[in-house]
Image (cartoon, rainbow, N blue to C red):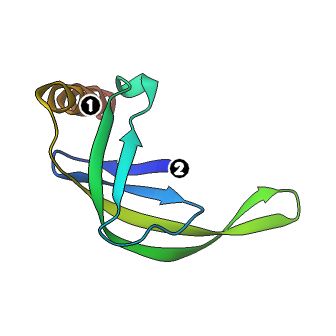
């Protein structure tokens, strides 16, 4: 899984297995962004082409949009911290 976009309302991810709409999904934010674990619903998912995984081998790649749901106060704080880290990195 690769995190493409992150915001207070949700995230966009890239992955190699399709996700069904309205499926509950747990997003583990990378340790460099604080390592929070956030829960959300898949609100859309679509094929995004192929990506190479090994020399001469490729797999279908998917992108999905997640909407964060029922975040605890601790998860909200972790998300806010991750967004601050991203904001600071973009300001360089």
Say which quarter of the image contains residue 86: top left
Helix, strand or loop status at disc 2: loop
Say which quarter of the image contains residue 38: top left
Residue shown at the point (57%, 64%) measured from the top left: 17
Residue matched to label 1: 91
Other residues around mark 1 within 10 Å, as few (<14) / some (14–19) / many (≥20): few
Picture coordinates of residue 9 (x, y %)? 16, 51
Q: Which mark is residue 34?
A: none
Helix, strand or loop status at disc 1: loop
**Viewer-proximal residue, 91 or 20?**
20
Q: Which mark is residue 1?
A: 2
- Which of discs 2 and 1 lies nearer the camera? The answer is 2
Of the numbered discs 2 and 1, the one sitting upstream in the chain is 2
Picture coordinates of residue 37 (x, y %)? 34, 34
Residue shown at the point (42%, 55%) measured from the top left: 13
Residue shown at the point (83%, 64%) measured from the top left: 57
């Amino acid at each position: 899984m690769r995190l493409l976009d992150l915001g207070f309302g949700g995230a966009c991810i890239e992955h190699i297995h399709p996700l069904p709409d309205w499926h509950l999904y747990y997003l583990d934010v990378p340790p460099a962004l604080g390592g929070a674990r956030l829960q959300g619903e898949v609100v859309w998912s679509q094929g995004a082409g192929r990506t190479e995984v090994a020399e001469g081998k490729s797999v279908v790649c998917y992108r999905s949009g997640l909407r964060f749901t029922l975040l605890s106060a601790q998860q909200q704080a972790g998300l806010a911290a991750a967004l601050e880290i991203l904001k600071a990195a973009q300001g360089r």
